[in-house]
Image (cartoon, grey):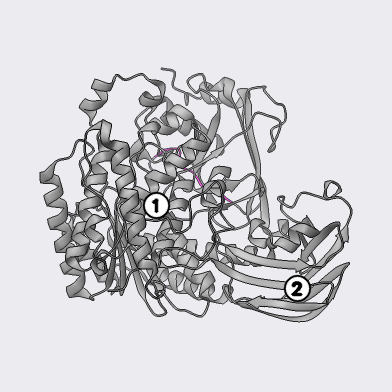
Amino acid sequence: MPAARCSPSVPPKVGRRAAGDLDCIDIADSSFGSARRKPFNFSPGTAMRNRLIVLACFIFALFVNSARAEQPFFIQDGDVVLFWGNSITDYGVYPRLVENYVLTHHPDWKVQFFNLGWGGDRAANVDRLRRDLQLCRPTKVTVMLGMNDAGYGPFDPKLLSVYLDSLKTEIEILRRHSNPEILLISPSLCELRCIPQVSRGALEEKQLNRMGWLLYPQTLERFSYELGQFAGREGLKFYDLNYSSARASEELAGYDGNFMFTAESVHPTVDGQLQMGLEILRAMGAASLVAETAIDAAAGSLTGQTDCSVTGLKASPRAVSFTRKAARLPLPIYPSSAKLMRTVMDWPDSWDRDIVRVTGLEAGWYRIAVDSREIAVVSNSQLAGGVNLSRWGHTPQMIQAYKVFEQTERRMAAFWTRWRRVLLEGVGGPGDFTQFKTGVDTGALEAAERAAFEAQHRLNQPVEQRYEITPVEHPALRPSPYLPASGFLEDMVRVFISVDSRTLPEFKPPLVLRGNFSYAPQYGWGIVEEKGYYANIPVALYDDGTQGDKVAGDGTWSIEMYLRKGSGKLWFGVWDGEYQIGYWNALHPDYFRNRWCQELTQAWGDLLGRLNERGAGIYGIPLDGDVSLVWDVKAFEQAEKNGKIYRP
């Protein structure tokens, strides 16, 4: 079986990992599979030596693999792709990333995707696989299990035996069902820095040892090693996500010790899911180039075009214009508010390279416009080195890509509702093997899935665009390219949320929102997720006089943002850092563990008049017009008068 290609062909840069420095080899096709990672030595004094040995073996294996011919992308036209896993897969961020990559980078392909991840799942739940496989006949499968299987404590060989034996049974079930090509992915990391008591030094080491947390990262390393060996014996592809995620977390912490890769040590944040998805795409052999155009303005000639066609070129040392049609769209992602992810992952320059390079221009500043929309103001030297248009979120091609993204949300939401809310209504969890309901009407949901699928493949077709590069004054006189451009706001609604922290005596600022949306302050706009429960996506509120906040330092935390009109209902809750970690699922009633948080949530929902059928404060705000939600002293006093506030 051929090895997966592991990296795009871009040179490594200072300040980030080399593109090829990844833990992806096909053990079944490599005599170095058994040497990829030594079993973890549990002596603390040998930890660094173990990592160096692992890294040396891995780089040597990559060197051997690089001598082989480049292999095709793991997913191909006509495939049916199944994502199988636990809550990390269930959240659906990295499956969305893979699906949107295929949609935007291979617009002529027809590929079906099924995310059957379920929170809390273990490999031992083989009867769930037997039942849920009735929904599809996959040709490609990714399996990411192990986080729950390893027991959240010190290494237990009995748990490992159950894990591997159960995986073997699941592989046999898949092979009998449709004989797909299978990629095994090791469990992601356990990040001890995210445990509040650890970060505050409130628990002694012996207490943590009783909890098993201090040894759990090492347990997951051991499970990942054994999973790689299992993949070699079974002739399966394997990717060590645990190791690559741990390295990324360490590198991020090196830039900012306060950065957390996960929300509460296990579940990755949206940035963690982004990193996971990009690494998995690398392992699958994904390419990074969108298109590249090179022009010599002084000679008035086209000097290069890769994955695009250029017509109508007019060029001089003072101005350039041309029409271009790229072969594909850029890859849309959840807007990330963490600049460190761009630093370490080098996003988008290593992954979404939509390059326009113009040499021979006179010295000065130049305005780049696409279809008459200003994108950026850059210097002639920047243009000579090549400008990556994917750095801006409001290019016509990126907006088109996000419209594809939104249809992916609609398709996944319709499928998830059909699967979990209709066919499996009342099923308690992944260990409940109750069969699908019969005689239920799923026609409307199936029609919604088909409509979204058709819209995905209608909207992902590249179109011709007119480019104009003209001289301007110094960019300080120009509007910021990171704000939503005029014309883009026609499709957006303004959302203003303000919370007076004086009404929340149990909360410790800074405050954040947690809900079903993601927001990037550098772009000024965000995305609503339509799936049937909360994504693990914190969004910061501000008390510094920016991002819609009126007065810096007055204790009122606010945000002003733009979300796409009609993209779904907005759900969220308000949290501080401690409660965010300790009670991470903001409003879901099954996760209420703290009376104060519960009562505040209900009071907030009551203020809006939007309680769910169980009386809990889960509400959905339709984005059909501008929204302004203010929780101030007046609102708090009214809620307290109505008996909606609980004081501990």
Q: Name the residue carrying label 1.
A: 91
Q: Residue at x 72, y 59 (%)?
A: 490
Q: In this view of the protein, which residue sits in the foreground, 178 or 60? A: 60
| 571 within the magenta span | no
Q: Secondary structure at mark 2?
A: strand
Q: Residues within 10 Å of mark 2 (few under 14, many from 20)?
A: many
Q: Amino acid at mark 1?
A: Tyr
Is any part of residue 261 visible from this angle?
no
Q: Quadrant of residue 311?
A: bottom right
> Is 254 rendered above or below residue 566?
above
Quadrant in the picture for the N terminus: bottom left
Quadrant in the picture for the C terminus: top left
Q: Which residues are magenta?
A: 615-622
Q: Name the residue carrying label 2.
A: 295
Would residue 306 be found to the left or right of residue 63 on screen? Answer: right
Q: Amino acid at mark 2?
A: Ile
Q: Quadrant of residue 468?
A: bottom right
Question: Residue 433 location in percent, x, y?
Answer: 18, 57
Question: Residue 555 location in percent, x, y?
Answer: 63, 23
Question: Residue 612 location in percent, x, y?
Answer: 43, 44
